[in-house]
Image: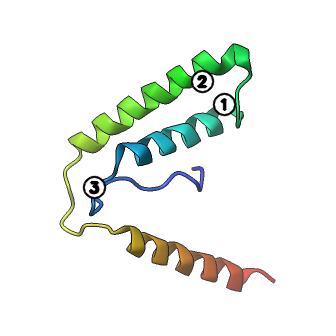
Amino acid sequence: MCRNIRVLHNFEPPTTPDEIRAASLQYVRKVSGLNKPSEADTAAFEQAIDAVNAATAKLLAALTPRPSVRTREGEREKARARWTMRAARTP
């Protein structure tokens, strides 16, 4: 999975539409292999982002919340800990 796509489910405060849109953009960029589409492909690119955005929002609304709610600060700390572990293993 693309490392730039973040977990969006079960956060406090709730995930914003901008966060969902950003994840959708990252997904479409990854799948297409394009950071920025050509003019000829812009409409298809935007349509794909909108479709992924709608599907993601629908999925997040349908999921059952877990008892332990995530916080953005907690997720950042976990990511830092993973990075520290990876850096320690690198010769």
Which numbered circle lies on residue 14?
Answer: 3
At 43% from the left and 48% from the top, the residue drawn is: 19
Q: Amino acid at mark 2?
A: Phe
Is the residue 41 above or below the residue 31 in the image? above
Disc 1: CA contacts within 10 A as few (<14), some (14-19) or many (>=20)? few
- The image shows residue 18 at horizontal and vertical percentages of 42, 44
Q: Is residue 16 left or right of residue 50?
A: left
| Nearest-to-viewer mark from 1 and 3 | 3
| Structural distance between the alpha carbons of marks 3 and 2 | 27 Å
Point 52% across, 72% down: residue: 79
| SS at circle 2 | helix
Name the residue at the right extreme.
91
State the image quarter where residue 4 is shown.
bottom right
Give the Cα separation between the discs numbered 2 and 1: 9 Å
Q: Position of residue 24 (x, y in %)?
A: 49, 38
Taking 67 as reference, is 53 above or below it? above
Residue located beneath label 2 in the image: 45
As drawn, which residue projects farthest toward the top?
40
The disc at residue 32 is 1
Residue 32, given in percent of the width and then of the height, sits at 66, 30
Number of other residues with Cα within 10 Å of mark 2, as a class: few under 14, some 14 to 19, many 20 or more: many
Mark before the other along the chain sequence, 1 or 3:
3
Amino acid residing under circle 1: Ser
Q: Earlier in the sequence, mark 2 or mark 1?
A: 1
